[in-house]
């Protein structure tokens, strides 16, 4: 392909992808499947790797991340990012209204109401229509430059495609993790034995500051915009500014309303108190802004906040009820979760009977005693939580909680690892919920995808003693399945077909499915790609594992321990005999060019534009070879940031040429 052809193709693909992005993220009306979308993106990534000089500044490939940032640069905000004054009652709000009226000398004015989104505030700068910088609030004066991470947010335009836009403007908004995404992340973490996150806001904040933007992309952040700043915006009111933002393709929450007076504001507040709980993100109040920008300017700012805006905070709905007892749940990884058994009580639309207590520390922190009256709250989290004990109602006879010492399911003594909040049941192979949980994990969609079996079937198969581990599934006969409740010939056949069909699932799915602690789907993919076979992985040393992408000490240790266990090895051998995929069938990568002409490379350090395995693929696709150690025969040491000094020394001693990422990109172009 010539450079001119490539340029055309890149442009065409970019337009197509941007079009489908808008349909999906702004209009919620997709016209192609996710798979087709990913195919387009893949094609573009490939072309850009081949012709890096043709990569457009607003390329949609930036949304998949890949850039590693060691430390974020500190940036001074052009306009400081102030906070808002808070009010908690209609009276306080009426006082605010009085101050506004006096400040405007009796001139008429209007308000603009929005919900207060509970996320992380962000400032975005656009120059000549291009998103050039995204900065966190920081201390209000200076924040962190997190542009590469923010570019992964699909609903955010990387370029504004309107003719009449200011040369430069700033827009502010709130980055958040949608509730369902947060729930999914926690479910996945629980599944692989990681501690779950406390709430969506903190998780969003942690995600914005992650070093690896590819990981940020996987987290699926979203962003609502609510403030336009700049010298040349040609708007007179905040509502016009919001219309402009929408027209330029920014995502604006449809929940705003223009209000003529404080009475209408109070009605808005009341209306959204309950309705907001059904929104896809957490909100904790309402922001009330004077609509006219000229009037905003007249009212001005105090040292900390604008005089033209204020927030009204909703009280989290809370109710007191009796703690009848504490029960304990054991998960797939053996983690024990205490659950408060409550006297049923009606709260924010549903009857609450139980609340999670997280772990023993939480019980101690609350100083819970059985029989206490406790305050229960439904905050952003879907599961209600116990926030405090109503000490006025405490009966001195109430007994303190003694945390269990043995597993409620199998009576094994519990353990608590240093630095971990949870207690664990170590009886991995004999504790019923752990066994059932492992099988459920194994059959899930992202693993072996056996959807003809479900939780209830697994439970029965286990209780009848027919299945005690995933490998047993492959020995099941039709007669076994006919022993299950309500299972007839047809559904038994279906189940067997589903089990048989699962044998074609790729190696990475098998690897995820066998349930090595801390090995989630992404890590399983990386391991499969890096080690290629189950045998190679099972024989890898701790040090070799650390060399693989995304593998840290915790994961390396867990993998080594898994493959040391004799019973695990027997299980793995049985799965292999059953015919599961134990090797990754890497599609032969399409050859892009022969520019690297059989030259050999060792890759070391971290890179600006590539992940390690992307680099590896690029080298091979352009006719080069990737070696793992430096020798006299090696042609190039491709050095990223943070490469160890020993490697450099060795290369210098052996006369191996050391090249940077930029020099490497030049080699691709020649
Ligand atoms: S306007 C000058 N609108 O609340 C203040 N802020 O306490 C301009 N927030 O840091 C902010 N939802 O992160 C505004 N609809 C909304 C908001 C909102 C949430 C956050 C924002 C800000 C904080 C102020």
Image: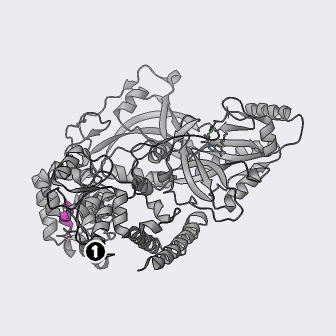
Q: Which residue is mark 1?
A: 587
Q: Nearer the viewer, residue 259 or 665?
A: 665
Q: Nearer the viewer, residue 72 or 36?
A: 72
What secondary structure do most residues of the magenta stretch adopt?
loop
Counting from the top left corner in percent of width and height, residue 498 is at: 29, 74
Residue 506 placement: quadrant: bottom left
Location of the C terminus by quadrant is bottom left
Q: Residue at x 31, y 32 (%)?
A: 403
Residue 52 placement: quadrant: bottom left
**Label 1 beta carbon within 8 A of ligand 1:** no
Against 45, residue 287 (above or below) is above
Secondary structure category for the residue under label 1: loop
Residue found at the far top of this picture:
396
Start-end of magenta stretch: 465-476
Counting from the top left corner in percent of width and height, residue 80 is at: 63, 37
Against 68, residue 422 (above or below) is above
Ligand 1 position by quadrant: top right
């Amino acid at each position: 392909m010539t450079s001119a052809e490539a340029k055309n193709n890149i442009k065409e693909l970019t337009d197509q992808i941007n079009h489908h992005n808008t349909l999906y993220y702004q209009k919620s009306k997709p016209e192609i499947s996710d798979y087709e979308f990913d195919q387009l993106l893949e094609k573009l990534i490939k072309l850009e790797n081949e012709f890096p000089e043709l990569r457009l500044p607003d390329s949609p490939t930036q949304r998949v991340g890949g850039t590693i940032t060691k430390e974020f640069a500190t940036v001074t905000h052009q306009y400081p990012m102030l906070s808002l004054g808070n009010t908690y009652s209609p009276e306080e709000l009426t006082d605010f209204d009085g101050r506004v009226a006096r400040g405007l000398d009796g001139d008429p004015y209007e308000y603009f109401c929005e919900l207060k989104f509970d996320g992380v505030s962000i400032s975005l700068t656009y120059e000549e229509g291009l998103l050039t910088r995204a900065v966190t609030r920081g201390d209000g004066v200076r924040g962190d430059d997190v542009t590469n991470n923010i570019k992964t947010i699909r609903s955010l335009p990387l370029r504004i495609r309107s003719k009449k836009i200011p040369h430069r403007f700033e827009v502010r908004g709130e980055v958040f993790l949608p509730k369902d995404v947060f729930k999914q992340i926690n479910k996945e973490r629980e599944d692989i034995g990681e501690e779950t996150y406390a709430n969506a806001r903190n998780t969003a904040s942690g995600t914005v500051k992650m070093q690896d933007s590819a990981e940020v992309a996987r987290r699926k952040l979203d962003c609502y915009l609510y403030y336009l700043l700049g010298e040349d915006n040609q708007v007179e009111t905040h509502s016009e500014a919001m219309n402009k933002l929408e027209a330029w393709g920014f995502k604006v929450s449809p929940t705003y309303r223009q209000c003529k007076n404080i009475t209408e504001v109070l009605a808005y507040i009341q209306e959204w108190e309950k309705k907001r709980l059904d929104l896809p993100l957490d909100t904790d109040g309402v922001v009330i802004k004077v609509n006219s920008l000229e009037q905003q300017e007249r009212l001005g700012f105090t040292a900390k906040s604008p005089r033209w805006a204020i927030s009204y905070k909703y009280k989290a709905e809370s109710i007191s009820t009796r703690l009848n007892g504490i029960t304990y749940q054991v998960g797939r990884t053996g983690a024990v979760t205490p659950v408060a058994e409550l006297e049923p009580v009606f709260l924010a639309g549903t009857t609450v009977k139980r609340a999670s207590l997280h772990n023993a520390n939480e019980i101690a922190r609350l100083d819970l005693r059985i029989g206490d009256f406790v305050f229960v709250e439904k905050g952003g989290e879907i599961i209600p939580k116990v926030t405090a004990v109503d000490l006025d109602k405490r009966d001195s006879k109430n007994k303190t909680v003694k945390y269990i010492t043995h597993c409620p399911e199998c009576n094994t003594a519990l353990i608590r690892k240093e630095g971990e909040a949870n207690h664990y049941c170590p009886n991995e192979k004999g504790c019923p919920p752990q066994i059932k949980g492992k099988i459920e994990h194994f059959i899930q969609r992202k693993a072996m995808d056996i959807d003809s079996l479900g939780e209830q079937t697994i439970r029965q198969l286990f209780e009848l003693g027919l299945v005690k581990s995933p490998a047993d599934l492959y020995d099941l006969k039709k007669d076994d399945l006919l022993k299950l409740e309500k299972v007839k010939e047809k559904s038994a056949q279906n189940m067997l077909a589903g089990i048989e069909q699962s044998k074609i699932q790729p190696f990475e799915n098998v690897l995820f499915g066998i349930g090595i602690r801390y090995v989630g789907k992404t890590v399983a993919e990386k391991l499969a790609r890096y080690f290629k076979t189950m045998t190679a992985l099972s024989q890898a040393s701790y040090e070799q594992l650390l060399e693989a992408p995304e593998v840290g000490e915790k994961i390396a240790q867990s993998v080594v321990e898994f493959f040391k266990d004799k019973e695990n090895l027997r299980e793995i051998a049985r799965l292999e005999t059953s015919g599961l995929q134990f090797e990754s069938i890497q599609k032969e990568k399409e050859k892009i060019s022969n520019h690297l002409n059989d030259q050999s490379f060792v890759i070391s350090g971290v890179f600006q534009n590539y992940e390690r395995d992307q680099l590896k693929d690029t080298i091979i696709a352009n006719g080069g070879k990737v070696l793992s150690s430096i020798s006299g025969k090696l042609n190039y040491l491709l050095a990223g940031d943070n490469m160890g000094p020993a490697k450099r020394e060795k290369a210098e001693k052996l006369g191996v040429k050391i090249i940077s990422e930029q020099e490497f990109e030049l080699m691709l172009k020649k």
